[in-house]
Image (cartoon, rainbow, N blue to C red):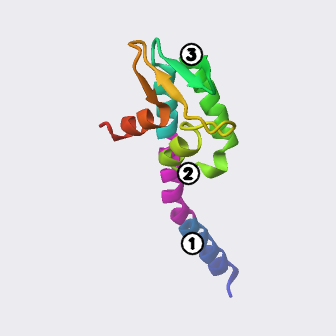
Amino acid sequence: MNPKIFHAVCLMLLFFAAALTLPAQTAETAEKTKIEALISHIEGLEGATFIRNGSNYDASSAAKFLRAKWKKEGDKVKTTADFITHVASVSGTSGKPYVIRFKDGKELPCGDYLAARLKEP
């Protein structure tokens, strides 16, 4: 085969291979963006207390913890639903659910709260 044709065919194959992976990368990036938005939302909950394994944490500490756990559990987290299930709902240590106590005193399981946030427009 002519070397110029061979190189052209190789370049076309590389182009098509890259084009096939683009939608997957875009979807993955979109999910990561949604997850980070959920964590940022948690971080911005003024006056909220986060209860994990019987201890209270402020919003900033909760966000740091969620980011660290997300990084640790990264192979299990492909979607926002995975994030809520594997990272933001229950303690891997105790099995107890994470709870958010809002400044008005109302308490909700963190996983339920985040799942509801996802459904909002």
Quadrant for residue 93, please give it. Answer: top right
72 on left or right of 117: right
- The residue singled out by tag 3 in the image is 58
Other residues around mark 2 within 10 Å, as few (<14) / some (14–19) / many (≥20): some
Where are the magenta residues, as a range?
A: 18-33
- The residue singled out by tag 2 in the image is 78
**Quarter the N terminus occupies:** bottom right
25 and 16: which one is in front? 25
Between marks 1 and 2 in the image, the one whose residue lies nearer the viewer: 2
| Residue located at (66% from left, 79% from top) | 6
| Residue located at (29% from left, 37% from top) | 121
- The residue singled out by tag 1 in the image is 12
Q: Secondary structure at mark 1?
A: helix
116 on left or right of 14: left
Residue 28 within the magenta-colored segment of the rendering: yes
Estimate the x, y position of residue 87 in percent, counting from the top left.
59, 40
